Image (tube, grey):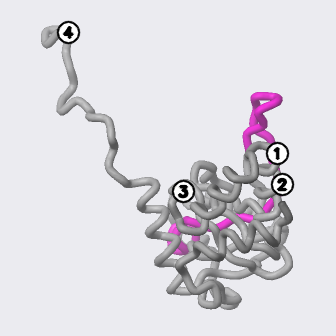
């Protein structure tokens, strides 16, 4: 399967207006809604069973006032981010793992937003020519200094329209009700 065919499968099931998804982000300070290239963040390596440091594209989740270095606050030196997997990389990986019919079903569900841990985002220029995927189970952090030393560069931002879509998906993934019942109170030895 070619990436163009995979993209068609996602877009055919996407219920959002991709033309309203991104803005340049010029004039916006570091904070939620922005995408950066060359971000440094940790990523777990299955082969070595250790974290490695990688550089890639990421979406900022932290509110701008919580990382503004002009605000004299403690604990404002890290930024919460979600790595972005370029769509073509996702397709190449899945082609190795899934038969074609399962891959097509997966891509259709990705476009329809039925996979709560993944959010497809449309093309964002040459860095994400076919779009990408926010993988919410890989939310991590990176130091504010990565943004101020000039290595990480802004490549765009969500619009108000798309921020609502992304924030709803994050809320649904992180805050949906637990299926298993939790104990109402702490059990003690005497209760057993």
Q: CA distance from mark 1 to mark 4?
A: 51 Å
Residue indicated by mark 3: 115
Question: As displayed, is residue 173 above or below residue 2?
Answer: above
SS under mark 2: helix
Contact, mark 1 vs mark 3 (Cβ under 8 Å): no
Contact, mark 1 vs mark 4 (Cβ under 8 Å): no
Residue indicated by mark 4: 189
Question: Where is residue 2, by image quadrant?
Answer: bottom right
SS under mark 3: loop
Contact, mark 3 vs mark 4 (Cβ under 8 Å): no
Front-lying residue, 86 or 94: 94
Instruction: Name which residue lies at 70% across and 89% down.
Output: 24
Of the two numbered discs 4 and 2 in the rendering, the one whose residue sits closer to the viewer: 2
Give the magenta range.
43-67
Magenta span contains residue 66: yes
Q: Quadrant of the N terminus?
A: bottom right
Mark closer to the chain start, 2 or 3: 2
Q: Position of residue 105 (x, y in %)?
A: 63, 57
């Amino acid at each position: 399967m070619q990436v163009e065919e995979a993209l068609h499968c996602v877009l055919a099931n996407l219920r959002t207006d991709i033309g309203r998804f991104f803005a340049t982000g010029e004039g916006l300070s570091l904070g939620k809604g922005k995408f950066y290239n060359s971000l440094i963040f940790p990523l777990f390596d299955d082969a070595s069973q250790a974290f490695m440091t990688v550089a890639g594209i990421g979406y900022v989740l932290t509110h701008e006032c919580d990382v503004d270095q002009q605000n004299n606050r403690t604990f404002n030196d890290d930024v919460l981010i979600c790595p972005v997997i370029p769509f073509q990389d996702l397709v190449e990986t899945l082609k190795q793992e899934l038969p074609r019919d399962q891959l097509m079903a997966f891509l259709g569900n990705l476009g329809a937003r039925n996979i709560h841990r993944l959010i497809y985002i449309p093309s964002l220029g040459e860095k994400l020519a076919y779009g990408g995927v926010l993988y919410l189970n890989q939310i991590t952090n990176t130091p504010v200094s990565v943004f101020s030393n000039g290595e990480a560069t802004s490549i765009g931002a969500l619009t108000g329209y798309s921020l609502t879509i992304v924030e709803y998906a994050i809320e649904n993934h992180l805050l949906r009700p637990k299926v298993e019942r939790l104990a109402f109170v702490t059990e003690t030895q005497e209760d057993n």
